[in-house]
């Protein structure tokens, strides 16, 4: 499934800055950054549950916000992009 992940982590103290870095690292490991705090991820159901569990252990539920949107398929029909293109399209073949 294709997911859109957005987060807003409070960075008013050092603990918040640390949480922000951890959330970003987990998102980077599971998807592609499309904006500062927005990621697109392609995960199966098990991967999604592990991903959500990791993030839920990090965020402060009283201070932070994390949203996960499931993108409808076909993606091209429901997602409109304007401006700078992504550096890597996860749906194209990867040539090494």
Image (tube, rainbow, N blue to C red):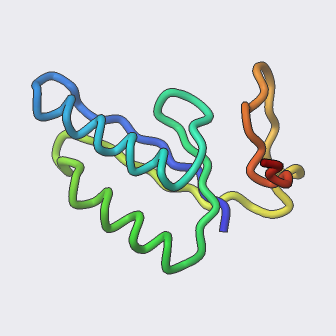
Name the residue rendered at 78%, 27% in the picture: 85
Horizontally, residue 26 falls left or right of residue 46, namely left
- Could you tell me residue 41's position as x and y percent? 60, 55
- Could you tell me residue 95's position as x and y percent? 83, 49
Relative to 18, residue 61 above or below: below
Quadrant of residue 91 within the rendered picture: bottom right
Q: Nearer the viewer, residue 16 or 71?
A: 16
Name the residue rendered at 39%, 40% in the picture: 24
Name the residue rendered at 54%, 78% in the picture: 45
Determine the residue located farthest toward the bottom in the rendered image: 46
Q: Nearer the viewer, residue 86 or 64?
A: 86
Name the residue rendered at 73%, 32% in the picture: 86
- Could you tell me residue 30's position as x and y percent? 51, 55
Quadrant occupied by the N terminus:
bottom right
- Could you tell me residue 32's position as x and y percent? 60, 44
Relative to 52, residue 75 above or below: above
């Amino acid at each position: 499934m294709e997911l859109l992940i957005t987060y807003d982590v409070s960075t008013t103290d050092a603990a918040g800055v640390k949480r922000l870095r951890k959330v970003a690292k987990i998102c980077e490991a599971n998807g592609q950054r499309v904006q500062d705090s927005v990621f697109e991820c392609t995960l199966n159901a098990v991967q999604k549950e592990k991903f959500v569990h990791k993030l839920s252990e990090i965020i402060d539920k009283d201070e932070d916000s994390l949203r996960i949107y499931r993108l409808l398929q076909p993606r091209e029909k429901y997602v409109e992009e304007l401006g700078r293109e992504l550096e890597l399209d996860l749906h194209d073949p990867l040539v090494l």
